[in-house]
Amino acid sequence: MTDKKLTTNKGIPVSNDQASITTGEDSSYTLLQDVQLIEKLAHFDRERIPERVVHAKGAGAHGYFEVTNDLSKYTRAKFLSEVGKKTEIFSRMSTVGGERGSADAKRDPRGFAVKFYTEEGNYDLVGNNIPIFFIRDAIKFPDFIHTQKRHPSNNLADANMFWDFLSLTPESIHQATFLFTDRGTPQNYRHMDGFSSHTYMWYNEKEEYVWVKYHFKTAQGNRTLTNDESIRMCGENPDHATEDLYNAIENGDYPQWDVYVQIMTNDEAKEYKFDPFDVTKVWYHGDYPLIPLGKMVLNKNPENYFAEVEQSAFAPSNFVPGVGPSPDRLLQGRLFTYEDTQRHRLGPNHHQIPINRAKNAEINNYQRDGPMNIGDNGGSGPNYYPNSQDGPIPDISFKPPAIELQAVIDKHTRPVEDVDFVQVGEFWRRVLNDTDKEHLVNNIVGHLGNAQERIQYRQTSLFYKAEPEYGTRVGEGLELDIGKIKTLSEMSQEERVEATKK
Ligand code: NDP
C-alpha cells in the first residue's frame, strides 16, 4: 500500500477521486464548485499537442555513443575527441507520412534521429534509413509531403498525386527506387541502417574543414518485410516496430549501430563527378570508403512515452563547435523548418523540457520570458548584452571557418540532368540481386498501377531512362506499350510532360 497521497495539480489533497460533488445520490446535478472535477476534465481536454506534420508516429530510447576511432584531426567537437569517450544520447525512429496512430509497417522512409547530450551542448543528427532524398530543394518539401499524405477532398491516400508529383520531379527517382525495394519496409527499427543523408562540415582547431556524411550501420543486420508481410503486419500489429524496440531493450538485447563517416576535402568536392551537396546522390563507397567513427547503443527505454518521445524535439540546426552545415539546399531549408516546427508544436521554450534540455552543458544567454517558461528565466541577471554586470560573454576560443563565396543571387532552378539517373542505374545493375529486382518491380507495379495510365507512362519512362531493363519490367507488369515508354524516355522532361498531359 502506498503512502503517496493524491492531489490536484496544485498539490491540494484530494479526498475522493471516484465521485463528483452532486446534489443528491441519484439523478442529481453536478456542481460547478467541484473544482477538482473541472481541473481534471479541463486538463484532459488539452492532453493532445499538435502531432508532428511529418514523422508523427515513432519510438525512442536512451543510450550512448562511444568513439572507437580518433578522427579529431578533422573536427574539434569534444564528444569526438578521443577513443573510448562516451556521450549520452536519445534516439527516435519513426515513419514519415502516417499519423500518430498509423501502422509502423507501412512502406515509407524511416526517420533516424539522434540527440547527443555533449558537454558543448546538444547536437542533433536528424536523418533517415535511406541515404538520399526525393527532392534537393526545400521549396519543394511542402508539396512533396502533401502528395504522401491524404487527398484534400476525400482524405484518402492517392496514387495519382503520389506518382504525378514524383514523375514531374525526376530527381526523386533514386529515392523512389529505394523506397520500393524491400528496404522501404524494414522488419523493425533495429534492423535498419541510419544515414545523415545530408553532407555536413567538420572543422578543426585550425579552422580547416572537410565535408562528411554519417552512416549508422545496424549491427543486427538489415532485415526487411516483403510487401505482403508488411501489409499483413499493418493489420495484425500496427505498433510492431515500437513494440519490438521496447521489448528488445527491456530484455537486455540492446540494439547497436556501428557509426562511420565518409570524408571529402573541399578541393575534392569541387571535382567530384556528382554534386556532393545534392541529397539525391550518394558518394560511392569506392570513391569515399566508410571510415569507422564509433558505435551507438540503445539501452534504456523511456519511462514516459509522452514526456520523452512525444516531446523530444530534434533539429538539424543544433550543431556543436566542430560541426556545421553544408550548402545542401534541402539541409539549408531544414535548418529553419525543424526548429520552427518545434516552436509551433511545443513552444519557444521547448529546450527547457527535460528530454530536450542540455544535460551536460550550461545554458547562458539573454533570451527571456515566453510561454511555458519553466526555468529560473535568468534570475536577477542582466537581460541585455553587452553589459557591465558580469553577464555571459561570447566564447572566443572557437570560430567556424570563414567560407569564401562569389555569389549570383537568383532563383537558380536546377534542371533535371542525365546525371540524375546514373546512380539509379548503378543501383539496379550493381547492387540489387534477382530477388531484390523482382520485389522492386512488383512493389512498384502494385502501387503505380492505381494511378492514371498517362502517369504510369511518364513514371515508367523515367525508370527506363535509368536502366532500360528496369523500365521494361515495370512497363510489362503494368501492361504498357514498351515502345512508347522508350520514346518517352528519350524526350526532354518538358516534352515528356507535354506528351503525357492528358
Ligand atoms: P556499394 O556497391 O559499395 O554498396 C552497395 C550499397 O547498397 C550498400 O551500402 C548496401 O547496404 C546498399 N544496399 C544493398 N541492397 C540494398 C537495397 N535493396 N536497398 C538499398 N540499399 C541497398 O555502393 P556504391 O557506393 O558503389 O553505390 C552503388 C549504388 O548503391 C549507389 O548508386 C546507390 O544507389 C546505392 N547505395 C550507395 C550507398 C552509399 O552511401 N554509397 C548507400 C546505399 C546504397 P548494406 O551494406 O547495408 O547491404
Image (cartoon, grey):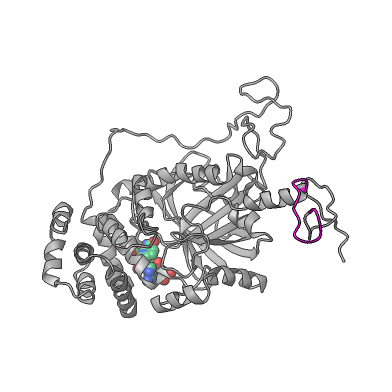
Quarter occupied by the N terminus: bottom right
The quadrant holding residue 471 is bottom left
Most distant residue in the front direction: 27
Residue 405 in percent (x, y) is at 34, 34
Lateral position of residue 311 relative to residue 209, left or right: right
Q: Position of residue 19 (x, y in %)?
A: 79, 59
Q: Answer above or below: position of 449 versus 130.
A: below
Relative horizontal placement of residue 449, taking residue 55 as reference (left or right): left
User: Is 382 drawn above or below residue 211 in the view shown?
Assistant: above
Residue 236 location in percent, x, y? 51, 77
Q: Can you see residue 261?
A: yes
Q: In the image shown, does 34 or 46 lie closer to the viewer?
A: 34
Residues in magenta? 21-34
**Magenta segment: does it hold 190?**
no
Q: Main secondary structure of the magenta part?
A: loop
Q: Position of residue 187 (x, y in %)?
A: 48, 73
Query: Does residue 398 appear to the left or right of 144 in the view shown?
Result: right
